Amino acid sequence: MTDRPIDALDRAKGRKVMIKLKNGEEITGVLKALDLHLNLWIDEAEVKKDGENKLKLGTLLVRGDTIVYASPVQI
Amino acid sequence: MTDRPIDALDRAKGRKVMIKLKNGEEITGVLKALDLHLNLWIDEAEVKKDGENKLKLGTLLVRGDTIVYASPVQI
Amino acid sequence: MTDRPIDALDRAKGRKVMIKLKNGEEITGVLKALDLHLNLWIDEAEVKKDGENKLKLGTLLVRGDTIVYASPVQI
Amino acid sequence: MTDRPIDALDRAKGRKVMIKLKNGEEITGVLKALDLHLNLWIDEAEVKKDGENKLKLGTLLVRGDTIVYASPVQI
Amino acid sequence: MTDRPIDALDRAKGRKVMIKLKNGEEITGVLKALDLHLNLWIDEAEVKKDGENKLKLGTLLVRGDTIVYASPVQI
Amino acid sequence: MTDRPIDALDRAKGRKVMIKLKNGEEITGVLKALDLHLNLWIDEAEVKKDGENKLKLGTLLVRGDTIVYASPVQI
Amino acid sequence: MTDRPIDALDRAKGRKVMIKLKNGEEITGVLKALDLHLNLWIDEAEVKKDGENKLKLGTLLVRGDTIVYASPVQI
């Protein structure tokens, strides 16, 4: 079967991902769930902007239309 | 059944949530209802921007397309 | 029956509401009608921006996609 | 029958209306026709921005998605 | 039959129109064709911004979602 | 048959076109293919911004919703 | 069969592409998969902005609606 773009993220469920938002913020955390709109459920989420200190937020629902790109974090 | 991203917020009904808006404002309050567009009904709502004093607004209907992310507040 | 987010506003028909717009303006007035797009018919409408003097506009049709949030005014 | 928000404007056909646009411009003129997207046909249209001199444009088709709000002008 | 807003422009086919764009540019030219998305085919098109010199472009396809308003030019 | 706006561009396939983007950039190149969303396949593409030096990019897929207008280049 | 615009990119699967984003960032990497929304799965991805140092991100899911244009890199 052909790969779909969303599979790049779907395979990262349960692992740490980095998300770049249109407002410039970056979120890192564990990907719990995603849907076709790219809405994301992130656990152990941390938010930062322009290298500033991180804000720890725990569980987070990120709206898909606010995302620029998302990337599984390399270990 | 597989979790959906919106479940991260759906389970927080009746509890306090923090919402980050695209205009930079942050809203905190008790989540009363939500729908698939991520429109939110918030009670005991407070709005602040850039750490300024809070504006108490009581009941609030937040339009889903103005939300960046939403997070159940940790206790 | 479960509450929907729009019910937070629907129950305020005939009462005074405050509406925050994406362009930064705030509108107050009596909510006459609303639809699922959050288009609003406001009577006795007043518009202000950044605490400036209010502009009295009477009857107003507010386009739903320009709204950040709307709130029944507490008495 | 219940009022719809668009009725606030539909009843103003043939009368003068004021329209606030997302780009900050204000249009006044006689409302000739409207549709559910809030596209408007304005006759005897005048456009101004930030209190500057008006530009007289005659007949105008205003795209609905560029409108913040529209208001029948009080006499 | 009731007039539709787009008729304000449809009747101007073959005549000169002025188009205001969301990026602040103004286009004048002869309206050749239009569709319901307000995509426009303009011939003998000229583009200007903030009163600067005009750029002559000949045939132009203007994307409907970039238009603020369009107006048949009065003679 | 009535002309459609997109025909203004469709007839320019195989010829040089100029495309103005919402981010202010201008692209010139040979139009290879287009669809109803105004997505464009451009060959021998060159990109410039504010009169700066051109960047040669070869084959380019331009997303339709980023286009302000497109014009066949006059010879 | 007639070419579609997306074919310009589809044929570049397995090869290096350059992607220009609406937020000004540029991404380069190997195109693994794409869909009709122009969502892209990029491997060996590098991100840069305004000529600054590159950020290596590995696997990346780029949201289609954040893309201005995409181009197979010439060798």
Image (cartoon, coloured by chain):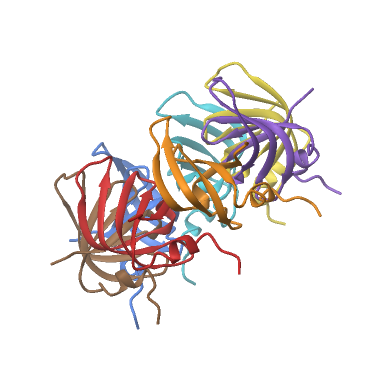
Chain colours: A orange, B red, C brown, D blue, E cyan, F yellow, G purple
Q: Residue G10 appears in which quarter of the rendering?
A: top right
Q: Position of residue C75 (x, y in %)?
A: 12, 67
The residue that appears at 20% across and 63% down in the rendered structure is C29
Q: Residue furthest top?
A: F53
> Residue placed at 73% from the left, 38% from the top?
G31
Q: Nearer the viewer, residue C51 or D48?
A: C51
Q: Nearer the viewer, residue C69 or F50?
A: C69
Quadrant into which the N terminus of chain D falls = bottom left
Q: Which quadrant holds residue F74?
A: top right
The reply to whether residue E34 is in sight is yes
Is D50 on the left or on the right of F9, as rendered?
left
The picture quadrant where one finds residue C46 is: bottom left
Q: Position of residue F69 (x, y in %)?
A: 58, 38
Q: Position of residue A68 (x, y in %)?
A: 54, 41
Q: Nearer the viewer, residue A2 or E51?
A: A2
Quadrant assignment for the C terminus of chain D: bottom left
